Image: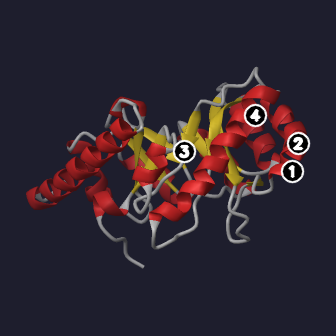
């Protein structure tokens, strides 16, 4: 597949700007830019655009829909060193596809899906790295374990311990989706709460690695980095607005 040079150049320019903003945000928080992993979100993005991203050095892509992602991953299997992350809500009937095609899952939001992922990963003789998706805003429209009320955190310890004991999934940390505020600063208190929740889990379930924090999107990833993000999920700022 031939890719337009102009398209490669535009994505390269956008990517450079994003990387500069990541580096500055990391510096402001006393961290190195290498401590933040950029996940290029390719929901509804065409194959040629993804290939242009790969030519610009992008190695990690995030997808929301399992079946659409599987088609892309199969079409691009000749590209080595590329990671695919599942960042969207997972339907039970898509769990097998997720286990087959993805390197890391950000969106474990209920016990049922954790058990499905464990089952299918076991059948594939793999251990699947996962993040626990938590809802720190309290929005009904958001998926995730309810972590918005700090008094209820204790209720999450039992299911989290049960998931940690599953043999074919490995918890690596937390993920959260912010509300879409016009002012990215409004997400800062939510990310601070998420960091407190992680500290609580580190204390109560110390045998699990809670290092990863997947927070921040195109509209607020600098704030997320300043508050401790180790992964940011950026699509629009790299590839432009998606159709629909």
| Cα–Cα gap, marks 1 and 2 | 7 Å
Badge 2 marks a residue whose secondary structure is helix
Percent of width and height locating residue 238: 29, 57
Residue farthest to the bottom? 244
The residue at 80%/56% (across/down) is: 149
Specify which label sits upstream in the sequence, 3 or 1.
1
Quadrant, the C terminus:
bottom left
Q: Using the rendered view, name the quadrant where residue 130 is placed.
A: top right
| Cα–Cα gap, marks 2 and 3 | 22 Å
| Cα–Cα gap, marks 4 and 3 | 16 Å
Looking at the image, residue 116 sits to the left or right of residue 194; the answer is right
- Disc assigned to residue 201: 4
Specify which label sits upstream in the sequence, 4 or 3.
4
Badge 4 marks a residue whose secondary structure is helix
Percent of width and height locating residue 77: 38, 40
Looking at the image, residue 64 sits to the left or right of residue 20; the answer is right
Residue at the spot of label 1: 151
The residue at 50%/42% (across/down) is: 229
Residue at the spot of label 3: 214
Please state which of the two labelled residues, at mark 2 or mark 3, is closer to the viewer. 2
Residue at the spot of label 2: 154
| Cα–Cα gap, marks 1 and 4 | 14 Å
Please state which of the two labelled residues, at mark 1 or mark 2, is closer to the viewer. 1
Q: Say few, some or many: other residues with alpha carbon within 10 Å of mark 3 (under 14 / 14 to 19 / 20 or more).
A: many
């Amino acid at each position: 597949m031939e890719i337009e040079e102009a398209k490669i150049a535009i994505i390269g320019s956008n990517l450079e700007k994003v990387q500069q903003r990541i580096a500055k945000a990391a510096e402001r928080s006393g961290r190195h830019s290498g401590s933040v992993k950029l996940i290029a979100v390719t929901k509804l993005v065409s194959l040629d655009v993804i290939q242009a991203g790969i030519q610009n050095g992008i190695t990690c892509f995030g997808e929301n829909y399992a079946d659409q992602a599987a088609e892309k991953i199969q079409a691009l299997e000749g590209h080595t060193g590329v990671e695919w992350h599942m960042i969207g809500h997972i339907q039970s009937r898509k769990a097998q596809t997720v286990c087959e095609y993805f390197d890391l899952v950000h969106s474990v939001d209920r016990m049922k899906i954790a058990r499905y992922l464990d089952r299918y990963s076991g059948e594939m003789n793999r251990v699947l790295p996962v993040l626990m998706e938590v809802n720190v805003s309290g929005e009904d429209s958001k998926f995730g374990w309810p972590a918005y009320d700090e008094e209820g955190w204790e209720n999450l310890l039992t299911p989290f311990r049960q998931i940690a004991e599953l043999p074919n999934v490995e918890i690596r940390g937390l993920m959260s989706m912010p509300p879409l505020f016009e002012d990215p600063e409004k997400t800062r208190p939510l990310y601070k709460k998420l960091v407190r929740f992680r500290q609580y889990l580190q204390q109560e379930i110390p045998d699990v690695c809670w290092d990863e924090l997947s927070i921040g999107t195109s509209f607020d990833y600098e704030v997320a980095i300043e508050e401790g993000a180790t992964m940011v999920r950026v699509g629009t700022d790299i590839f432009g607005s998606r159709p629909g």
